Amino acid sequence: MRVKYDPEADVLVLILRDEPPVDSVEEPGGVILSYGGDGQPVSVELLNASIRKLVTAGELSVTLEQAGTR
């Protein structure tokens, strides 16, 4: 998984798979789910990331945990 943040658009993107999306659905609250040709999610976009306090201006900190490693 990769994480990207676009400060100009204020969008945080979680890229789950390196596959081009063929469909997307915008959920209420500014969440966009994109799907690949197999119908499985390829990315999640979170709009207005700084307003949601998902990122702080000028910094982005991400922690990834593998299941079962706590």
Image (spheres, rainbow, N blue to C red):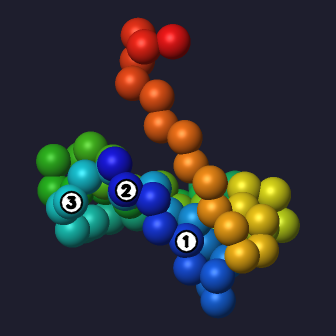
Which of the two discs, 2 and 3, labels the residue nearer the N terminus? 2
Q: Secondary structure at mark 1?
A: strand
Residue type beneath disc 3: Asp
Q: Report if the CB atoms under discs 2 and 1 are less than 8 Å apart.
A: no
Which of the two discs, 1 and 3, labels the residue nearer the N terminus? 1
Identify the disc placed on residue 64: none
Residue 20: quarter of image: bottom left
Q: Residue at x 16, y 48 (%)?
A: 38
Residue 29, position in %: x, y? 74, 57
Q: Residue at x 48, y 37 (%)?
A: 64
Identify the disc placed on residue 5: 1
Q: Report if the CB atoms under discs 2 and 3 are less than 8 Å apart.
A: no
- For label 2, the residue is 2
Count of numbered tags: 3
Residue 59, position in %: x, y? 68, 68
Q: Nearer the viewer, residue 4 or 32?
A: 4
Identify the disc placed on residue 18: 3
